[in-house]
Amino acid sequence: MSKLDDVVKEVADEMRRMPERGEVATYIPELARVDPKAFGIAVIDAEGNVAVGGDADTPFSIQSISKVFTLTLALGKVGDRLWKRVGREPSGSPFNSIVQLENEKGIPRNPFINAGAIAVTDLILSGHLPREALGEILRFMQFLADDSTITIDQQVAASEQRTGFRNAALANYMKSFGHLDNPVDFTLGVYFHHCAIAMSCRQLAMAGRFLAQFGSNPSTGHAVVQPERARRINALMLTCGHYDGSGEFAYRVGLPGKSGVGGGILAVAPGKASIAVWSPGLDTTGNSRLGQIALEHLTHRMGWSIF
Ligand code: DON
């Protein structure tokens, strides 16, 4: 057993015993059905060693973690033109907030709040049918994770499509500024479906490897992006990846990370490891409560904080 195996096992054991697990998201009704006791962790180090604990192979709804991958895909398609539609500053506001959009002329603060991610999805969609854009996003996830079994949970997507009134408001508001190129329904449909991709911690840690390894995934031999782009995506994850909880996450964990309301977090220790954790109970900023604690313990014990 390596030190990493020991630490991952310890962290999984500690999380299993945690009494206070946070609240499971209910605003997407289908997410409320998930077992709040679940906890999973998967870590892939620079050499490709995989350490797992708890429910590391149970698929969960990746939700906003998908925004890291749609950003990567959109940058590959439109390059720096993307930054005409989306900013690069932390918002200090909840993930679904609309307030800044009015003063800032329909340009969302960053690609990870819902408004910014919807704008990014619109850039991927441009000129294609929703089905084609979605197929491209899903194939990208399968390619990164080297796993063709990854799918979209249609129940979760349909559940959000029925209840996503705030996202509809954000999309319509941006459309009124002329900042969405496609019909609002098309863009939202693709957005809801990529948020509903289901993956396990093991698959997610694999998909995030290129961010931890300077743009390439050594397991698959694939160069995904240039090292500079990987650095920049990591910078955005550090400053904006947990919305109005980003400062707290940087303070406690010290790594770039992206959360989702399904309770997952993808974290990146550059040059060292790609890490995925999952526990469905959330804190008041919509970020996994145990996921953050687990990452705090892991990075502390492994000495992986970037600071
Ligand atoms: O648009 C939404 O509200 C969800 N599909 C994603 C939000 C989310 O994951 C926020 N993250 N913690």
Image: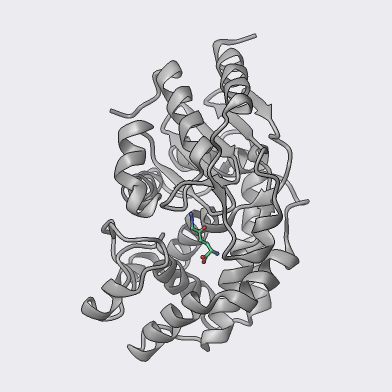
Residue 217, x across and y down, in percent: 56, 39
Q: Is residue 46 left or right of residue 50?
A: left
Residue 56, x across and y down, in percent: 69, 34
Q: Residue at x 38, y 82 (%)?
A: 174
Q: Is residue 256 left or right of residue 259?
A: left
Out of 184 and 231, give the one closest to the viewer: 184
Q: Quadrant of residue 54?
A: top right
Q: Residue furthest front?
A: 19
Q: Residue at x 58, y 29 (%)?
A: 44
Residue 285, x across and y down, in percent: 41, 52
Q: Residue at x 21, y 78 (%)?
A: 103
Q: Is residue 188 above or below residue 90?
A: below
Q: Residue furthest left?
A: 103
- Colouring style: one colour
Q: Quadrant of residue 49?
A: top right
Q: Quadrant of the N terminus?
A: top right
Q: Is residue 156 above or below residue 296?
A: below
Q: Is residue 166 left or right of residue 254?
A: right
Q: Quadrant of the C terminus?
A: top left
Q: Quadrant of residue 130?
A: bottom right
Q: Is residue 232 visible?
A: no
